[in-house]
Amino acid sequence: MNRTWCLLFLSLAPAALFGQAISGDLVGSVQDMSGAAVTNAAVDAVNESTNMKSSTRSDANGAYRFSNLPAGRYTLSAAAPGFNPASLKGVTLEVSKIATVNLTLQVGQVSSSIDVTEAPANIDTTTATIGSSFDARESRDLPISSIGLGVVNLSLLNAGVASNGGLQIGRGPSVGGQRPRNNNFTIEGVDNNNKSSTGALIVIPNDATQEFTLLQNQFSAEFGHSSGGQFNVIVKSGTNDLHGSVYEYLQNRKLNAQDQLFANSGTLSNPRYDNNRFGGTIGGPIVKDKLFYFGNYEYNPVGQASTPGQILTPTQNGYATLAGISGLSQTNLGILKQFAAPAATPVAASRFPLVGGVPVEVGVLTIAAPNYQN
């Protein structure tokens, strides 16, 4: 099986290209120091990675709203005649969530402004949906995300999400006690469900993941068609800065503890398991502030031991019987002895094969055959 992944994405800046499944909303109000609404204030939201700018104005109640903004970090600013402009940096907007950020303007000259360097953490109070988001750093650094279903495993950190226990009822976590086959998997809102065995059809590499979002319940119909968890992965995009990474995720038998049950039975070394998943990413601008690219290449060679089905080989008595059969090639018999050690315990006599009409005692040969996946 070939486990080489190559992802290449081109992204455009206009917000009209993004749907609700891969974006969030930014709402709030503009007020003066007394708490009164500032109407018709110019409100701008600028993406800190791409400089994509969205603009709107506050209404009669001082409220503003940006719908379907791409997830990321924004600088939010507001200005109105007779007030000092104010801005708030580091406003984090997550997928499928509504961030509420209020701005306060002080009466003064237009030439001065008030800057707040970092926005506080946002709490979505507009919906009863239970869910969480994991950013690129968590997808890359948390060990739980480097095995199996990748970043989808991050959902196990949430309350009400558990492993399916290997009960063959679908792949993926159990959300709210439901079977994993009730889950819905998407990539940027596009269906990613394996229709045959359920679970995710494609696993996006950790270093190509911008954000992973899980919605557990009380979600609206726009987010999914299933009653279980809604698992959505957002792929990284390019930015105005040239950036990239080189990585490797390593699992090895030398790093694993010895299973005490195996040790008690006399097996004092772990079977072979060498899993190397390595690759690189690169992203940057094609046209600054307008067109970007991002690419990821990943290669995953795996070497592990496996025990095949029963292979029968002659026992010591069986080899003695073969040596006494007239007309049998002694050269071929010598090669057989060289590569097939005598079995220790014979199988039932009814399973003895006939060679020249003579039954030959055989037993099960225990070997560990190599198993490769590149």
Image (tube, helix red, strand yellow):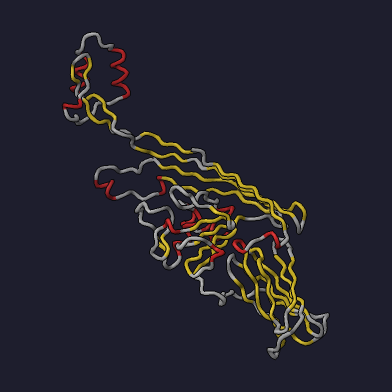
* In the image: residue 356, left or right of residue 29: left
Q: Nearer the viewer, residue 172 or 266?
A: 172
Q: Residue furthest bottom?
A: 34
* In the image: residue 267, left or right of residue 186: left
Q: Say how many tags the image has.
A: 0
- Relative to 370, say whether 183 is above or below: below
Q: Nearer the viewer, residue 191 or 12?
A: 191
* In the image: residue 180, left or right of residue 99: left
Q: Residue furthest left?
A: 349
- Where is residue 157 shown, x and y percent of the image? 45, 64
- Relative to 114, say whether 97 is above or below: above
- Relative to 249, say whether 25 is above or below: below
- Where is residue 369 shown, x and y percent of the image? 37, 34
- Where is residue 221 shown, x and y percent of the image? 54, 65
- Where is residue 238 shown, x and y percent of the image? 68, 55
* In the image: residue 40, left or right of residue 178: right
Please tell me which residue is depicted at 39% across the width and 40% down the height of the picture.
272
Q: Nearer the viewer, residue 42 or 249?
A: 42
Please tell me which residue is depicted at 30% across the width and 43% down the height of the picture.
268
Please tell me which residue is depicted at 41% across the width and 48% down the height of the picture.
255
